[in-house]
Image (cartoon, coloured by chain):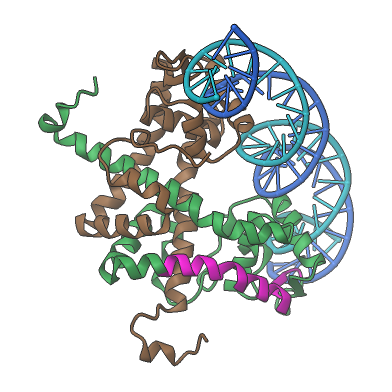
Chain colours: A brown, B green, C cyan, D blue
Amino acid sequence: MADISTRKVNPLFLREEELRQGIELLFYAYRDFTAEADQILDHYKFGRAHHRVIYFVSRNPGITVSDLLAILKITKQSLSRVLGQLVREGFIDQKTGTRDRRQRLLQLTPRGAELERKLSENQRALIAAAYREAGAEAVEGFRKVMLGILGEEDRERFTEDTPTGGGLRRRAS
Amino acid sequence: MADISTRKVNPLFLREEELRQGIELLFYAYRDFTAEADQILDHYKFGRAHHRVIYFVSRNPGITVSDLLAILKITKQSLSRVLGQLVREGFIDQKTGTRDRRQRLLQLTPRGAELERKLSENQRALIAAAYREAGAEAVEGFRKVMLGILGEEDRERFTEDTPTGGGLRRRAS
DNA sequence: CCGTTATGTCAGTTTTGTTGACATATTAAT
DNA sequence: ATTAATATGTCAACAAAACTGACATAACGG
């Protein structure tokens, strides 16, 4: 099946080495990308999970708990722990929905917004530097490939100009 | 504050949005990319940590424990747990170094190599599909941006044609 | 011989995830 | 109006994967 000679015959055959490099690029980039904010989080005694919650609440003010769960793909018990901490310590605000009073709409408090800014500042700077160095054309390629890697369900988040939560379609449930 | 009209007035707005998309592309792509192999690993009662060890040992046959630690950036106690399991269950082989008999050179057993192939097959297929769909030019852009994101120390791994461990320079220690 | 290095191990802790069961308030449907 | 479904929360137990700190052993290098 994976005969070496295929390489010469089939121009679409992607070299093993090229693909392995792709795997490793993802590993190293993600490792170094997340390492940035972790130091700041330590200072607040928070972890990466708190960061993700803060980030997506910031991106989608007024998001419901279940929509947040759909994004994070974790259990409500896991979310509850970190979300509870963030609410108790005054970084996130819950207000009962007006249309549906069962919902707890989430939004950052000023304090939460300040932490969010501090956290993503580093990451934006890192991305910005990489974008600047690589050039606009490379960025377009980066986007194309990344969109191909992530699941179809989430792809639309990047094609619309509404933020993450705006176009949240209901899950199969 | 975040008035929609800002977009027309402030050229930094689009930039901000562009950078946030970059952050999210990394989050979603990594989440979905790793989700693939996790199911196979469950079957062996292994986790993502085992996968990383298997992967990098495969890429760098005869790698030392400390070089592996430098790549993974975890503590030796953490590594010891998963590495111990992999050795005991016959996926990885340790042989005493000949030049330096303190070293335990790591390599996959046939069984380990089989698992590695099974695991990365999915990931390679995912990358391959994304590459193929995006086109060669986009792939070059992807590589450029990713290299800009990951730390300078690891960048050389991708410029040489030797695999990951080949050019492992000594750490500052 | 002695200091350093490479590796391993014991013990305890933290973060972040999991399952399963159950409780409450609210909405929607019959 | 009652009942079923939904949105959320909570208790409890557990597991994976990281951490710190302390200590042990073997081998290298001067």
Whole-percent x, y for residue A21 in the image: 45, 68
> Going 50% across and 71% down the picture, which residue do you hit?
B167
In this rendering, does residue A91 appear at all? no
Q: Nearer the viewer, residue B73 or B1?
A: B1
> Going 39% across and 27% down the picture, which residue do you hit?
A58
Please tell me whether residue A143 is drawn above or below residue B98 in the rendered image: above
**Snapshot quadrant of residue D27:** bottom right
Q: Which residues are magenta?
A: B102-128
Please tell me whether residue A12 is drawn above or below residue A71 in the rendered image: below
Whole-percent x, y for residue C3 in the image: 74, 54
In this rendering, does residue B163 appear at all? yes
| In this picture, residue D1 sits left or right of residue A127 | right
Image mark count? 0
Q: Which residue occupies the extreme left position in the image?
A: B9
Name the dominant secondary structure of the magenta segment. helix
| In this picture, residue A121 sits left or right of residue B28 | left
| In this picture, residue B111 sits left or right of residue A159 | right
Whole-percent x, y for residue A123 in the image: 38, 40
> Going 35% across and 70% down the picture, which residue do you hit?
B132
Please tell me whether residue B167 is drawn above or below residue A65 in the rendered image: below
Whole-percent x, y for residue A49 in the image: 55, 35
Q: Nearer the viewer, residue A155 or B150?
A: A155
Residue B118 in magenta stretch = yes
Please tell me whether residue A126 is drawn above or below residue B56 in the rendered image: above
Q: Nearer the viewer, residue A26 or A148?
A: A148
Residue B43 in magenta stretch = no
